[in-house]
Structures are given as C-alpha cells and as structure tokens.
Image (cartoon, rainbow, N blue to C red):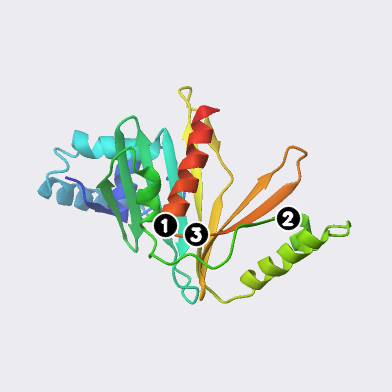
C-alpha cells in the first residue's frame, strides 16, 4: 500500500509516466542539475521503490501508477492551502481527488507527500479534517457588496448595510491566527476543467469564520462572512461541488 513518497520519487515517477504538470497546490521541483545527477537520483528512487514493493524492473507497480494517474487527472479535485501559524511562512498543502469510486487524500508535508484512500462520498469532510478543529466565531452570517467593504462604492449605504459593515469590520479587525482557502475543480468527460471561485476561511481569537465572494445576477460581487466549524465548511464545499457537477 502506498503511504508516502519523497519529492524526488514524485519528480522521477511523474516524468516517466508523462503525467504533465504537477497539480496545484503541490510543489515539486526538478531534482538533479545534470543528466548524470538526475539518472543517479532516479536509480536511487527506483531501488527504494522496489524494496517497498512499489516498483519492478524500473517500472512502477500498477497500484502506484493508478494513484499517480488519479492525482494527475481526477474528475473531482478539492484543494486546500492553509497557513496554520501566521508567524511561519510554511503552508499546509492538501487535496482530495476522485474519479468514480476511486478517491484519496493527498497531503504535502516538508519533503514528502502522503496518500490516504478515502470514501468517494467523504471528499469534503476529508479535506476539512486536515485543519485543526476550532469553534465557530460568534454572531450571524453577514453579506455585503464587496465595493462597500473596499470603500469603492459611491452610493450611500442604507442603515442595515451600515450596521452590517460595522459588524463585519469588527470581525476583520481581530487578530488572525490561521487562514486558508479551498478550491474546487471538476473535469468533464472531454477533459475540460472548470475551477470554481474559492472558499476562504480564517481563525481569530474568537473562533473561525468562512468568507465567500460570489456575483449576483447583475454582476455585482457580494461577500458573505459566516461563523464556521468543520461540519459547516464541509457542508458548504459539498453544496458548491454538487452545483458544479449539475452544470
């Protein structure tokens, strides 16, 4: 069973299987500055893979090839990038990918990428669970035109919008401890991809909030800020995914 691969192994296998570009948000650089150095790295990679039962005669076993092909060309992908400590520049990079009943959770940590099989019905919950559990922030959902929040609106806000703006600014002025974003990409049978607008989130000292920007029928962008925890974020991701699959 594949549990994790080193970045040099991913680099070598990806090239040999001709899988194209490494999918966002994973980051895998090319290893080896010369052809000779690259060949030595590949030889060491395949030697290790053969010891682990993941390759034979300089060729990945079907289980490994299938996993990497699923990662490269999934029908559904939900990715996550998260800053789990705003004082640290390192970010968590993860994704769930699925085609039919095949699904897995992929997480990049330092110099390794891990692979965990998951249920195809648990995509949203699996990607949300890579984050620490935090209670929802206080208050109710708030929705405002983006231009009003950015100060670009020339119209005079009505009393309700003014009150909402004050509440929203109060939340956004709190210290941010963690922050990140989820992205959803679906691929049709012709191989065309559709990437949905992201779903953001951030943790304050008062709890977690989810922020989403969507366009109304007239084209105006609106921001919705909602207190959120894991189940609420998973529910929203599932809703967005279902909407994309139905289009």
Q: Quadrant of the C terminus?
A: top right
Q: Position of residue 126 (x, y in %)?
A: 35, 50
Residue beneath the point at 37% across and 49% down: 125
Residue beneath the point at 16% across and 52% down: 48
Task: Look at the picture and state if 206 lies above or below 228.
Answer: below
Label 1: element kind? helix
Cα–Cα span, label 3 and label 2: 20 Å
Q: Quadrant of the N terminus?
A: top left
**Label located before the other in sequence (1 or 2):** 2
Residue beneath the point at 45% across and 47% down: 235
Foreground residue among 88 and 102: 102
Structural crowding at the residue carrying mark 3, measured as other residues with C-alpha within 10 Å and reported as few (<14), some (14–19) or many (≥20): many
Cα–Cα span, label 1 and label 2: 25 Å
Structural crowding at the residue carrying mark 2, measured as other residues with C-alpha within 10 Å and reported as few (<14), some (14–19) or many (≥20): some
Q: Position of residue 68 (x, y in %)?
A: 31, 40
Task: Look at the picture and state if 15 lies above or below 30.
Answer: above
Residue tagged 1:
230
Q: Position of residue 141 (x, y in %)?
A: 60, 57
Q: Position of residue 134 (x, y in %)?
A: 42, 67
Label 2: element kind? helix
Badge number at residue 228: 3
Q: Is residue 44 left or right of residue 142?
A: left
Q: Is residue 125 left or right of residue 2?
A: right
Label 3: element kind? loop
Please state the total of marks drawn on the protein image.
Answer: 3
Q: Is residue 16 visible?
A: no
Residue tagged 2:
146
Foreground residue among 193 and 19: 193
Q: Are marks 3 and 2 in contact (CB under 8 Å)?
A: no
Q: Are marks 1 and 2 in contact (CB under 8 Å)?
A: no
**Label located before the other in sequence (3 or 2):** 2
Task: Look at the picture and state if 174 lies above or below 67.
Answer: below
């Amino acid at each position: 069973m594949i549990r994790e691969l080193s970045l040099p192994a991913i680099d070598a296998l990806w090239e040999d299987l001709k899988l194209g570009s490494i999918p966002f948000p994973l980051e895998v650089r090319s290893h080896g500055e010369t052809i000779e150095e690259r060949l030595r790295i590949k030889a060491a990679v395949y030697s290790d893979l053969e010891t682990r039962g993941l390759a034979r005669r300089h060729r990945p076993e079907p289980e490994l090839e299938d996993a990497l092909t699923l990662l490269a060309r999934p029908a559904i992908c939900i990715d996550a990038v998260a800053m789990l400590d705003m004082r640290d520049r390192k970010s968590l990079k993860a994704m769930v990918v699925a085609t039919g009943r095949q699904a897995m959770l992929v997480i990049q940590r330092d110099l390794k990428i891990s692979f965990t099989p998951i249920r195809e019905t648990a995509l949203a919950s699996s990607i949300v669970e890579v984050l620490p559990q935090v209670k929802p922030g206080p208050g109710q959902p708030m929705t405002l035109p983006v231009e009003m929040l950015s100060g670009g609106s020339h119209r005079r806000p009505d009393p309700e919008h003014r009150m909402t703006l004050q509440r929203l600014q109060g939340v956004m002025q709190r210290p941010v401890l963690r922050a990140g974003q989820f992205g959803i990409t679906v691929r049709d049978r012709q191989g065309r991809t559709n990437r949905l607008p992201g779903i953001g989130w951030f943790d304050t000292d008062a709890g977690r909030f989810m922020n989403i920007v969507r366009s109304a029928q007239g084209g105006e962008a609106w921001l919705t800020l909602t207190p959120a925890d894991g189940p609420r974020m998973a529910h929203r991701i599932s809703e967005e995914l279902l909407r994309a699959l139905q289009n």
